[in-house]
Image (cartoon, rainbow, N blue to C red):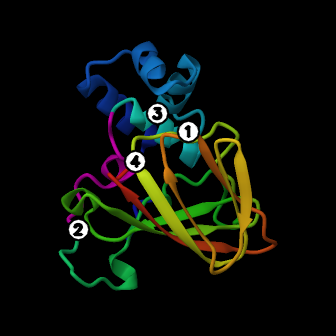
Amino acid sequence: MTDTHFDIGARLLAMRKAAGLSQRQLASQAGVPHAQISIIEQNKSSPSVSSLRKILSGLSVTMADFFESERAHPEGPFFGPDDLQDLTSRLSSTSATEASGRMTLRQIGDAHKHNLQMLHEVYEKGADTGETRLEHFSNEGGFVLQGALEVTVGDQSRVLMPGESYLFDSRIPHRFRNVHDGQTIVVSACTPPYL
């Protein structure tokens, strides 16, 4: 069961201090405004998935480690729906009744143990990783199962429909956006793990 009282601000503060970084140093390493770190640590704002990913990159910490550091991963090799690790349920900036714009990322098994991150991604109507594009040291690919996903990689952009896929060097700035009227569902992989 998911803990709905997870304190994102306190967790970020503790991890930043454990890394021996000031707010300014973390902001500089992550490439975000200093004020953003302060606002999140004080729980004055809930960060978007892309913002938190960027901040955690400055700590060399994955979202899985940030949210689930104490959780034991099922060993596998097989996993049921309840075995997937929800990386985003605690990050939603919308209420439980407002699904629009939300993304859900669920991880299969222990990504670090296998040096491969497999995700089941659900993009609700209007979901977008944000104008600030993602960049990280990995390679990633995905397969669209349902809906329509606009993928932008560098100066190239394309809307992918069910049965279409992508594969690229994640160091190239990129963005994902649901352009479908309903849910878009993707299965993706990233190595080395990023989230």
User: How far apart, in angstroms, are the residues tagged by discs 2 and 1?
Assistant: 25 Å
* Res 61 visible: yes
**Where residue 17 sits in the image (x, y, percent)?**
29, 23
**Where residue 165 sits in the image (x, y, percent)?**
59, 70
User: How far apart, in angstroms, are the residues tagged by discs 2 and 3?
Assistant: 24 Å
**Where residue 141 sits in the image (x, y, percent)?**
49, 62
Nearest the eye: 114 or 84 = 114
Say whether disc 2 or disc 3 marks the residue closer to the N-terminus.
3
User: How far apart, in angstroms, are the residues tagged by discs 4 and 3?
Assistant: 17 Å
SS class, disc 2:
loop
SS class, disc 3:
helix
**Label 2 amino acid?**
His
Quadrant of the image for the N terminus? bottom left
User: How far apart, in angstroms, are the residues tagged by discs 3 and 1?
Assistant: 6 Å
**Contact, mark 3 vs mark 1 (Cβ under 8 Å):** yes
Which residue position holds label 3?
55
Neighbourhood count class around disc 1 (C-alpha, 10 Å): few under 14, some 14–19, many 20 upward: some
Relative horizontal placement of residue 7, taking residue 162 as reference (left or right) = left
Which residue position holds label 2?
73
SS class, disc 4:
loop
User: How far apart, in angstroms, are the residues tagged by discs 4 and 2?
Assistant: 22 Å
Query: In the rendered image of this protein, does residue 152 appear above or below residue 89?
Result: above
**Contact, mark 4 vs mark 3 (Cβ under 8 Å):** no
* Res 98 visible: no
Which residue position holds label 4?
138
Relative horizontal placement of residue 112, taking residue 183 as reference (left or right) = left
Say whether disc 1 or disc 4 marks the residue closer to the N-terminus.
1
Which residue position holds label 1?
51
